[in-house]
Amino acid sequence: MRALLLILPVLGTAVFSQDAEQTNPSLTRVLRWLDDVQLHTPGYGDPPATEVGSWSRSQLDTLVGDIRRLAGFRRRARDSGLGRLATLDLYGRRLTREDVEKMFDGNRTLIRGAVLHADIAILVDDLSKRTPAYNDGGTLIFEDGRRRSGVQYETAHWQIGRLLLDAITPSPAGNASALLWYRATSAFLLRDRYLGEAPDHLNRALQIFPDDPSLLLDNGYLNEKFSSAAIQVAVQEMRATGGNPAVGSRRAQLERAERSFRQVLRIEPRQADARLRLGHTLGELGEHEEAAAELRQAFAANLKGNQLYFAELFLGREEEALGYRADAKRHFENAAELYPKAQSPRLALSQLARRSGDRAGAIRALQGVTSLRSTPLNDAARMDPWWEYYEAHGDDTEPLLEQMRALAGANIP
């Protein structure tokens, strides 16, 4: 018989004896999971992560049900005041409240478990090999608005992480570790474009932390992404072929993004990205006066780099829509100076000149665009930040994941 590593070796106390492996496969799986949670090295696809990652969806469902049952017993035992008198029968094993408290070690096991399952989703799960039998659904793959062959099936491990955090005592709502887990994993899902998983993930995050500005901003990013031309074209193609995508109309998604950005600014009025994106969203909704006001206010945040470029470009569009062509031209020219080889401000200047009857000016601006043909596409100097406007968390995802993984070795409350 394989020597069982028992539960929580760091505690030095085992709740079950080694013969537990011979009693019930589901009990054995609980024990194996508890061992793997402790043995896993965060940030690595190590044997503990590989083992748990190999279990089927039905096995994982049973495991999660058992953990939630244990967590519910712990909560009821605490609330009832029965203390040591309270017991729970789990696969023929009678557990006391003290036994279960040792398993959970405060909330440490639940936090470490959520980190383990996040690492499985990120580092271990091979989604290309998944089949519908092992999960609840999938995401059609699109590129540049066109459907590619195949379906990417969704992993169960994000949901398991969420369910583990739901079991935190007294509540995940006041737990800083749970908040960091949601912030890091949401950033990963948005950066790596797991758009099929991100809505449920953020919905649950905001149910627990409704006033967290980082999660509200992520929700704004997601809905703004869903409003983009690339996503909306893909949605139309799905519907034309009988599909039912969980994405609203362009206007509906813009209105959801607007609400999220406004919520962020109510909490953090100086949040520059929320202000900038609110201005862009309002402009897309046709609210040009209000959009221009928000964008002018964004400039007060001392913007730099891409943010300053977007502010100049977007305010130029709003000034043009309001009939202030000279101001629009100035903002487009400012954007062009920031990124001399970017196409967007040059195209905007050409269109502005054409609408003003300046045919020669329109041609000159377009000549600047056509001259870029001699510059390789991968040349950084040719970079136009607009190409990546709808992509979020390019810089901070890895630091957030590192912070989340550091929780596994920290004194988690």
Image (spheres, rainbow, N blue to C red):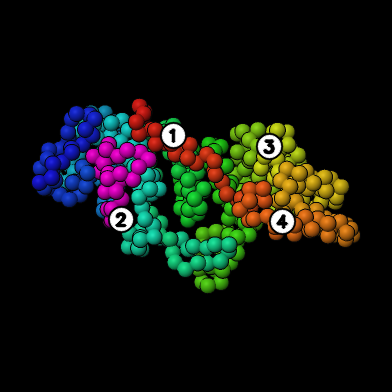
Q: Amino acid at mark 4?
A: Leu
Q: Residues within 10 Å of mark 2 (few under 14, many from 20)?
A: some
**Could you tell me if the residues under marks 3 and 1 are in contact, i.e. CB atoms within 8 Å?**
no
User: Three-letter amino acid code at disc 1?
Assistant: Gln
Camera-side residue of 305 and 96: 305
Residue 96, visible in the rendered structure: no
Q: Nearer the viewer, mark 4 or mark 3?
A: 4
Q: CA distance from mark 2 to mark 3?
A: 47 Å
Queried whether the magenta region covers residue 82, the answer comes back as no
Q: Does the image show residue 379?
A: yes
Identify the residue under disc 4: 372
Q: Earlier in the sequence, mark 2 or mark 3?
A: 2
Earlier residue among tags 4 and 1: 4
Q: Quadrant of residue 218?
A: top right
What secondary structure is found at the residue carrying circle 4? helix
Nearer to us of marks 2 and 1 is 1
Quadrant in which residue 152 is drawn: bottom left
Q: Earlier in the sequence, mark 2 or mark 1?
A: 2
Q: Position of residue 215 (x, y in %)?
A: 52, 41
Work out whether residue 412 or residue 332 is closer to the camera in this orientation and state it.
Answer: 332
Given contact means CB atoms under 8 Å apart, are the residues at marks 2 and 3 in contact? no
Compute the Cα span from label 4 to label 3. 24 Å
Query: Identity of the amino acid at label 2?
Result: Arg
Mark number for residue 403?
A: 1
Residue topped by disc 3? 304
Of callouts 3 and 1, which one flags the residue occurring earlier in the amino acid sequence?
A: 3
- Secondary structure of the residue carrying tag 3 is loop
Judging by the rendered image, the residue that carries numbered circle 2 is 57
